[in-house]
Image (cartoon, rainbow, N blue to C red):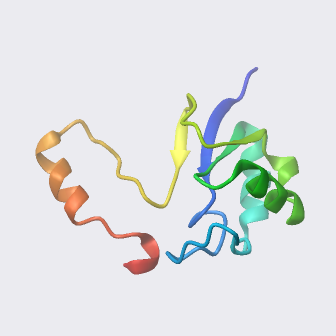
Amino acid sequence: MKKKTLLMDLDGVLNQYEGEFDKDVIPPPKEGADILLQKLNFDYEVKIFTARDIIMATNWLKKYNLFDYISGVTNIKEPAYIQVDDRCITFDGDYSNLLKKISEFKVWYKS
């Protein structure tokens, strides 16, 4: 049976990024990122979705022994069953509340 694809963001989800972007440095992984990816890999095809340079992100995943748990790295929004990101809002079908959700949004590390 084919696994469903899960897109996982890198910055702010898998690593210790907290808003200070440096294109040349990817912060180290958050504690437990390896265990999370290992568990997800059983049921999902996990792809890393990042705005960073793909080669740099791939090398980072290899450096921290995370690459074996994923099927690839992309900066294109590919078809997926679900996405995990630190900067997103779930659309609930109701536009009337969406503007409020957007204007009140706070990233988890600034809450």
Give the image quarter of residue 76: top right
| Quarter of the image with the C terminus in it | bottom left
Horizontal relation, residue 18 to residue 100: left or right: right
Identify the residue at horizontal 35%, vertical 52% (top origin). Answer: 89
Give the image quarter of residue 3: top right
Residue 15, how many percent across, how many down? 66, 69
Identify the residue at horizontal 78%, vertical 38% (top origin). Answer: 71
| Quarter of the image with the N terminus in it | top right
In the image, residue 33 above or below residue 27: above
Horizontal relation, residue 30 to residue 104: left or right: right
Identify the residue at horizontal 59%, vertical 64% (top origin). Answer: 11
Residue 30, how many percent across, how many down? 68, 73
Horizontal relation, residue 101 to residue 22: left or right: left
Residue 63, how many percent across, how many down? 88, 64
Identify the residue at horizontal 82%, vertical 48% (top origin). Answer: 69
Residue nearer the viewer, 69 or 39: 69
